[in-house]
Image: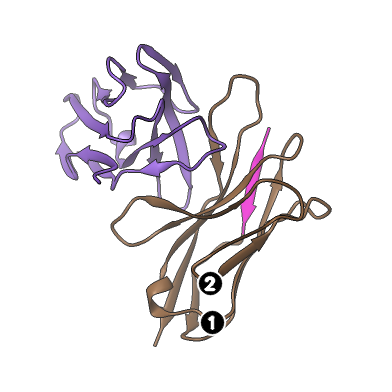
Chain colours: A purple, B brown
Amino acid sequence: NAGVTQTPKFRILKIGQSMTLQCTQDMNHNYMYWYRQDPGMGLKLIYYSVGAGITDKGEVPNGYNVSRSTTEDFPLRLELAAPSQTSVYFCASSLIGVNTEAFFGQGTRLTVV
Amino acid sequence: GDSVTQMEGPVTLSEEAFLTINCTYTATGYPSLFWYVQYPGEGLQLLLKATKADDKGSNKGFEATYRKETTSFHLEKGSVQVSDSAVYFCALPNSGAGSYQLTFGKGTKLSVIP
């Protein structure tokens, strides 16, 4: 049972480069989320989706974009990488919203230099 | 807005010691409350939850009781093990209209030494 799978696990980007963080889940969950985790700061919501074709901004969306063309996939796009985007990124999913258990991927550690 | 405050770490305990990690919250109404745990190199996973006042969530020897009078949800374990070394996050659902955000505390890192 794979759960939530994120790729890559690690990545180093140069300032101004672009990349896509991939996230897929096999639990048929409607809700998916992208968080970033900075040291000593907990997790901050970047974007979320309540179903295929529907996405919305979270607390810290600037510099990121998302799409949700299928129930399973929720990629996160960084268009012009900046050092402030150095962080650990987590994708998560839940069945019917945040009052139910959220399942997290293992994370992507991104460094922008 | 909704917020969670949990005790700052890091916390270092000897094996079999008693653990308490404090968590207090500010929220509209009576949301569900969660403790998530992050083991080294992994994503977060749900440890326990409580859905209403006076509920006690429990799992793997950990317990937390939803106290609406003190707006608290402290995490406790009677005898910690080395395998409990991890970062622990208290969390609650944001109650804002149309909001689907989990609000997390900053996390408390626990290290258990043999």
Look at 39% across and 43% down and name the residue there: A103
Residue B61's label in the rendered image is 2
Q: Which residue is mark 1?
A: B79
**Mark 1: few/some/many CA within 10 Å (<14, 14-19, 20+):** some
Reply above or below: A48 against A13: above
Do the residues bearing badges 1 and 2 touch, measured as CB atoms within 8 Å?
A: yes
Element type where label 2 sits in the image: loop
Q: Nearer the viewer, mark 1 or mark 2?
A: 2
Look at 65% across and 20% down and name the residue there: B97
Task: Read off the magenta span.
Answer: B1-6
Q: Chain of mark 1?
A: B
Q: Earlier in the sequence, mark 1 or mark 2?
A: 2
**Mark 2: few/some/many CA within 10 Å (<14, 14-19, 20+):** few
Query: If the image is split into quadrants, where does the N terminus of chain B sit?
Result: top right
Residue B48 is situated, as x and y percent measured from the top left of the image, at: 54, 56
Looking at the rendered structure, the kind of residue marked 1 is Ser
Reply above or below: A108 against A40: above
- Looking at the image, residue A113 sits to the left or right of residue B108; the answer is left
Question: Considering depth in this image, is A51 or A36 the residue closer to the camera?
Answer: A51
Look at 72% across and 38% down and name the residue there: B27
Reply above or below: A21 against A2: above
- Looking at the image, residue B86 sits to the left or right of residue A13; the answer is right
A90 within the magenta span? no
Residue B77 is situated, as x and y percent measured from the top left of the image, at: 57, 74
Looking at the rendered structure, the kind of residue marked 2 is Gly
Q: What is the C-alpha distance between the residues marked 1 and 2? A: 8 Å
Residue B101's label in the rendered image is none
Is residue B114 visible to the viewer in this orientation of the structure? yes
